[in-house]
Image (cartoon, grey):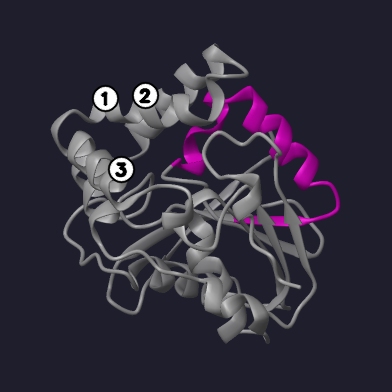
Amino acid sequence: MAEREVRYCTTEDGVRIAYCVEGEGPPLLVMQFFVESFSLDHRLPEQVAFMEKLRRGRRIIRYDTRGTGLSQRESYEYDSDSRTLDLEAVANAIGGPPFTLLCSGASTTVGIPFAVRHPDRVERLVLFGTVANTYEAFSEDAIRGFAELARTNWALAAQLFGDMSTRRSDATAGLRWGELYRDSSSGENVARALSVPLIDANPDLPRISGPTLVLHKRHDANYPFEAAPCTG
């Protein structure tokens, strides 16, 4: 694994956010898929291999959102704007030239509006395996059920989340991801994140000004191929 430099910054509302910088070249800011911490990558050989490929000729920046990983885990406010504040803090901290923003899974509803509002900072956008509105993939009842399970039995919920993406193709990977989610956050923090109103980024899609690459698996078990964001 390449040498990793861990840094910290503080959000506008006073939350301490951990981020890491690896490699050399044009900057690529990679957002979390769910609540996984970059500090636990070593548990996931598939993630290590993926990041090694991304690092070729690029400077990779990743961060843990509030309530996860090396970032502040307790004593913070959480609402629909919180994850935007986390992204803004990291973008301000790294400075430098405009970057490419890679969003996947749950991060896209934050990444798309950020790219629209900060075209001077986001040069390109990559949307991978996701939707612009979480309700297009999961019903409100399902999300409430996920939140309640996370709050009452985090070990079981974390394994459920791990299995949802990987069990069909690789059962052992599902176990690894479940353990990673479990140790990256707490059930209460995840329940809080799932309980706030979710952002609908669809109105922002036509307003994206930079080049955008949309990647999606045809048989994605979580995010339907038909609901993949369309920016054209």
The residue at 55%/45% (across/down) is 223
Q: Quadrant of the C terminus?
A: bottom right
Element assignment for label 1: helix
Q: Report x, y in % for residue 173.
A: 55, 19
Disc number for residue 142: 3
User: Alpha-carbon neighbours of circle 1 within 10 Å: few (<14), some, or many (≥20)?
Assistant: some
Quarter of the image that includes the N terminus:
top right
Residue corresponding to mark 2: 159
Side of 209 relative to 152 (left or right): right
Estimate the x, y position of residue 217 in percent, counting from the top left.
70, 40
Query: In the shown orientation, is residue 3 left or right of residue 54?
Result: left
- Where 131 sits versus 163, above or below? below
The amino acid type of the residue labelled 3 equals Ala
Question: How far from the left and from the top, in percent, is residue 64?
Answer: 44, 52
Stretch in magenta:
36-61
Q: Which residue is mark 1?
A: 155
Q: Quadrant of residue 200?
A: bottom left
Q: Residues within 10 Å of mark 3 (few under 14, many from 20)?
A: few
